[in-house]
Image: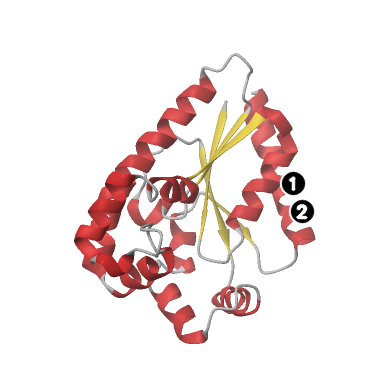
Amino acid sequence: MFTLAISGGIATGKSTAALMLLEFHGPAATLFDCDESVHRWLTKPEIVESIADRFGPTILDAQEAIDRSALGKRIFANTADREFLEAMLHPLVLEEGTSAWREAKEADEPVELFIFEVPLLYEVEFALPHDLDVLIAASPTTQRNRLREVRGIPDERIDALLNSQMSIADKVERASCVVWNDGNKKELAAQLTLLNQLTEARIKA
């Protein structure tokens, strides 16, 4: 089983790339999305309670669930709060992801390709098993345009989001493989086709 770790910055297209790679292999590939894991943990009563104790009741919505928009604004504005949240959630995500990887490796139906989608792969050096890490990169201008035009985020919020993350340039220096995604899906697919040829060669080796 060949394992890819896909990472990138906000609005660089890492989720789109991961799904495209899945399609190359069909049922012989599987994906573990770290963001989805975080969202699942944020619904657990014990996690909700810990976050409410730290941030106060205003972090909850009318249904007593985590208000993710309010939480996002809080952690982007306060380093200590972000570190508290990461220290609580990252070990849980790491354990869940590693468990999913082991299950895929030992499954009766063979899995050729396992993909981890890890937004903070380079920031926190997630110790998830992988044979190759791939950065889906885009220029800050493209990130801003996508955040503004596709997601409708105002400029001042975009500045806070981008400033809270490691720069794309720094991630490029750390990455084993870089896919540049400033263009359209056709251009992205062409690069991913080449990447898939590499992974298929490694799978068959």
Pinpoint residue 13: horizontal percent, then vertical percent.
61, 60
Closer to us: 69 or 129 = 69
Q: Are there few (<14), some (14-19), or many (20+) residues within 10 Å of tag 1?
A: some
Q: Is residue 3 left or right of residue 186?
A: left
Say which amino acid is labelled 2. Ala
Farthest front residue in view: 62
Residue type for callout 1: Thr
**Front residue of 182 and 106:** 106
> Label 1 belongs to which residue?
193
Residue 60 placement (x, y as % from top left): 34, 63
- Residue drawn where x is 66% and y is 47% of the image: 19
Residue where numbered disc 2 is placed:
190
User: Which corner quadrant of the image does residue 113 belong to?
Assistant: top right
At 37% from the left and 73% from the top, the residue drawn is: 73
What's the CA distance linking mark 1 and mark 2?
A: 5 Å
- State the SS at label 1: helix
x 32%, y 48%: residue: 89
How many marks do you count on the picture?
Answer: 2
